[in-house]
Image: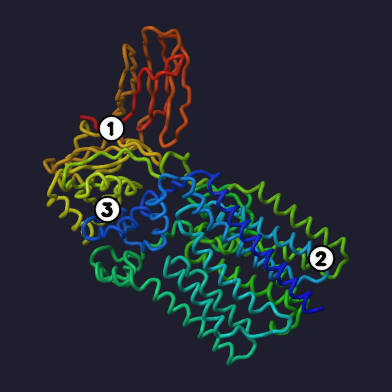
Amino acid sequence: MDRKRGSKYCLSAACLNIACFVMFIAIGAIASVLRGQDANWDLLNYHYYNAWAFAHSRYGIDRFAAEFQSYFDPALDLPYYFLVANLGQWPKVVSAVMGMQYGLVLYILYLISDALVSQLVGFSQWQKQTLALICVSFAAGGSALWSQAGTTTNEVSLAVFVLLAVLIFLRGVTKSEPSPISTRRSMIIGALVGAAVGLKLTAVTYVPALGLAILLSTPVFEKRLRAFGAFGLGVGLAFGLSYLPWGAHLYRETGNPLFPMFNNVFHSPLWAEIGSRDTRYLPKTVADWAFYPLKWALSASNTVSELPTRDPRIAFLYLVIVLGVVARVTKVHDQRIGQTSAVERSMFLVAFIATFSYFTWLALFSILRYAIPVESLICVLVPVFIGRACDNFGSRAKSAAVIAAALLVIASTLFTVPPNTQRVAYADRVFSIDAPTLPRNSLVVLADEPIAFMAPFLHERQPSVSFVGTPWYLYNFRGYGVSKAIAKQIRNAAGPLFVAYYFKTPPSFEWLSKMGVRIDFKRCRSISTNVSADIALCEADLNGVPGDAPSKFKLVAKVVTVNEAQLNVRPVKQCAPAKLLDGTARVDWKVVGTDQTELFVNNPPSEAWNRLALSQSIGTAEIAKWLQGGLKFELRSADSAVLATARIEYEPCD
């Protein structure tokens, strides 16, 4: 009888897990679709280009097309590239598949939460399940995780590896009696985080915490060393298998297996001897080290993100630490972790992983999107701590604990302002780009950022085209191998030369001008895309005066009229650096044969056309200081027929 009852319980638990898996995967897919198509900066700069370049063996043909990120391992970008290549005509399907990773993270968090709440004493099964779902809901809305859901930044993919390692570790210590983590389990945990590091080096944040947690969880010294050694072996083998092929490629090409990172160690002549680590967000003072999360917990700030963020979740780590210390000091459990109750041992070790990982992240990066596992584990721990505090009280207190945890999640979610990562409306394809067909053997200089995403589509029209990147900072590295190789490729171009940049704001052409590259700004064609502002593709040659780069620009309007409509957009003809132009203009129009006209303005890649003025057949509008390159105007009749169009561009002053 007991055996039958146990079999029914196992069957119902398995069915519940399957139902939760399907539910969370569906939630991830639906959430991603509803948020719109991903068009983040890194995707347009290198995630799509790198995968395409790998698939088409572009190494040695293109140089620096996606800037220094051209040298990043494309392994994690390949799934998205092949999705677009095969399902590009169904952008919502691509978005749904990308969002499933977010759902998988939620499912793993549910299993971690369930492993912790299942050990709470005196809670009903319904209360435990509710508390586990509250933990997941808390994590689901976190700024680090939610902002990356359905995107190509690959942070969610890494979180799957790291959180799965935490789950496997947790299941090894959530037993009624202390038991050392087996060497097999330790090696699997190490292999997961080692593979994550091999796929993207930022995952190194979580290796020390899991290694030390394995040491703490094992009371016997010899077994502790054995488990830790197995963990290290797993990390080393998995890292080698996942990174060795790309590292060997980089070493052959550059002399640095991590190029351009750590070039102060490997001394490749192709780049400056610098570490190339982004240190903009690191804590600057002792107070920052102590209270950094409070900077974005109470008010929106750019402390750990390029985009404003307000989120108290990571700041709750202080609560976790305080409750953990209080539990130890008051001897809620015994002195040795191996002799504590199951829930206390599990809570302590997960809290240790979250805390140690947080300080490692703080020291290495302090970039919010790299902290998804930290944020998620904190979100799991807080409701569990609330439930644990009511273990010694009655059923009403336990119900109150569940309600309090739910209210905390709701309040935090309403208070949170996640980073508003770039998303666009769905078009007929994932990438809808009106790429022209260039002459054979054309060389396209990508002089702006992020712009490399369009390279595959120009190549599709003309397979002999090649690309080089000349971002704004390249001039500062002009004496190194990369810059010299780019200069040589431009000088020896076998076909016509083109320069690509965004109409919105011309970049610095200083490096190109030093080579004598002359850009014909009057012979530019516009490339419209659904994911970015319009791109200028201008003809160029090597007949310029070295160093004669345009430094001052003026705004001009390129007008196309239909029938007898007259549209004039007159920007203030002020010669100044592009970023300092004041954007003031006067618009006037005259139309024959219609009683009502409307003037609309659009700022790509947005599809929204905002009405600027409503008038009769003759009208005037004033624009005060917001005119900029790339803006589009449409003059429409009462029946919405387009009578005239205009696009604002920059031209260098004579």
Q: Nearer the viewer, residue 571 or 141?
A: 141
* Quadrant showing the C terminus: top left
Q: How is the image coloured?
A: rainbow
Q: Which residue is mark 1?
A: 553
Q: Which residue is mark 2?
A: 124
Tell me the mark number nearer the camera, choosing from 2 and 3: 2
Distance from the alpha carbon under mark 3 to that under mark 1: 22 Å
Badge 3 marks a residue whose secondary structure is helix
Give how far across and how far down residue 530 sits, in percent: 40, 39
Q: Please name the amino acid that badge 3 sits on.
A: Leu
Badge 1 marks a residue whose secondary structure is strand
Which label's residue is closer to the chain start, 2 or 3?
2
Which label's residue is closer to the chain start, 3 or 1?
3
Q: Where is 425 relative to 624, above or below?
A: below
Give how far across and how far down residue 339 sits, in percent: 73, 84
Distance from the alpha carbon under mark 2 to that under mark 3: 63 Å
Instruction: For the residues labelled 2 and 1, say whether their Cβ atoms are less than 8 Å apart.
Output: no
Which residue is located at x 30 percent, y 66 percent? 273
Give how far across and how far down residue 647 sits, in percent: 34, 27
Q: Which mark is residue 474?
A: 3
Tell me the mark number nearer the camera, choosing from 2 and 1: 2
